[in-house]
Amino acid sequence: MLHRVPALLALSFALTVAGCDKGPKAGATPAPTTAAAPGTAPAAPADPTAAAAAGVTPVIDPAAAAAGQSFGAGVKLPESTPIATILKDPKAFAGKTVRAEGLIVDVCPKRGCWFEMAGAGPGEKLRFKVVDGEMVFPLDAKGKYAVAEGTLSVKDMTLEDSVAYAKYQAEEKGETFDPATVTAPISVVRIDGTGALIRDKM
Amino acid sequence: MKTQWRKWFRILHRDVGYVAVALVVAYGVSGIAVNHIEDWNPNYTFAEDRFDLGPLPPGPPAEQAAAVVARLKLDPATVRGHFLETERDLRVFLVDGQEARLDVTTGRGVHKRVARRAVLFELNSLHLNNLKGVWTYVADVFAVALIFLALTGMTMMKGDRGFLGRGKYFVGAGLLVPLGFIVYLYQ
């Protein structure tokens, strides 16, 4: 009788595992919705040509376009809003669901809880942030291409908070920080993410 | 009857314990690793080499990025893209999270490399449930097993060495440690 116990444990374990797969799958591409939901931002197509001219390399590969790794709820909006458009007037998009895409230029090195996508122009970046542990983005995603969706958040900070924020960001990346570089209050614009698709190429 | 339940608890405690050994060790090791995340990165190692390529010829960022790749003698196939952080600060992204970042006016920069920590990366992925999906349920089963081991563990001995003997004091001491911290934190 005793020798059956481990076997029974193993069987119940295997049955539990086999019946419960609801997680994200690598390579799965969420089906896009055909209409924008209420509260979503009007999207203009992202322009890879402009990106190429301004500072971001678009590596267009149709075969790779459909592939990728899906995170969270995936991407449901049919079109992306250019990052430059969002950054030009972020308050127009605040609180709305937006989809944006771009080259990943930084990833949270400690918890993988955010990444930054490049816009078309020099220095244009938009952060995609998720609750710690909800989605975990690998550091080697840097240099890959992301399509990300969530609610745009705009937070105006005091100068004191801006310095503290910049200091924390620098420490997180292991960079040196000079408080004198923050001379004016900053607004933190980011997407509070619900889902993303990361692929090797645009 | 009293002896029967104790006998079965001992049997199950022993065998569930055997099954749980690997994950107890894995979660324990990972627990120590991620506990000190403010002091070190438990998932990745970083390395960087400084370089001086000389000033880059003026031109579009794509051409400057190509020049960086050529001067560093990198395989162009490893390039994923580039980004102009500022007018002088060019970042060229390579496979596996590598990056060459430089000041285009001086050509001085750094080649950053990142690598996953062998074993620890995988252990942390399991422990923090980065895998999601099926692993969530495996971890749930493991958590239930730990609760079972804790509860049945208190029934292993009878008499003075059992829970009703000195065991209750040890259990109480174990409870006081986290309880003390919570009281200290919220007072």
Image (spheres, helix red, strand yellow):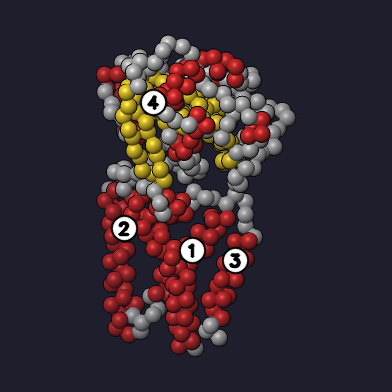
> Looking at the image, is mark 2 or mark 4 nearer the viewer?
4
Q: Find disc 1 in the rendering and name its residue.
A: B142
> Callout 3, which amino acid?
Ala
- Report the Cα–Cα distance between label 3 and label 1: 13 Å
Q: Is residue B25 among the parts visible in the rendering?
A: yes
SS label for mark 3: helix
> Callout 1, which amino acid?
Phe
Q: Position of residue A95 (x, y in %)?
A: 55, 26
Chain ID at mark 2: B
- Kindly indicate whether the residue at mark 4 contacts the one at mark 2 (C-beta within 8 angstroms): no
In what quadrant of the picture does the N terminus of chain A appear? bottom right
Say whether disc 2 or disc 4 marks the residue closer to the N-terminus.
4
Chain ID at mark 4: B
Look at 50% across and 18% down and name the residue there: B62
Q: Between A144 and A132, which is closer to the camera in this rendering?
A: A144
Q: Extreme top residue here?
A: B58
Marks 4 and 1 belong to one chain: yes
Look at 31% across and 58% down and name the residue there: B178
Q: Is residue A168 among the parts visible in the rendering?
A: no
Say whether disc 2 or disc 1 marks the residue closer to the N-terminus.
1
Q: Between B121 and B147, which is closer to the camera in this rendering?
A: B121
> Looking at the image, is mark 2 or mark 1 nearer the viewer?
1
Q: Quadrant of residue B113?
A: top left
Q: Which mark is residue B101?
A: 4
Look at 29% across and 71% down and name the residue there: B170
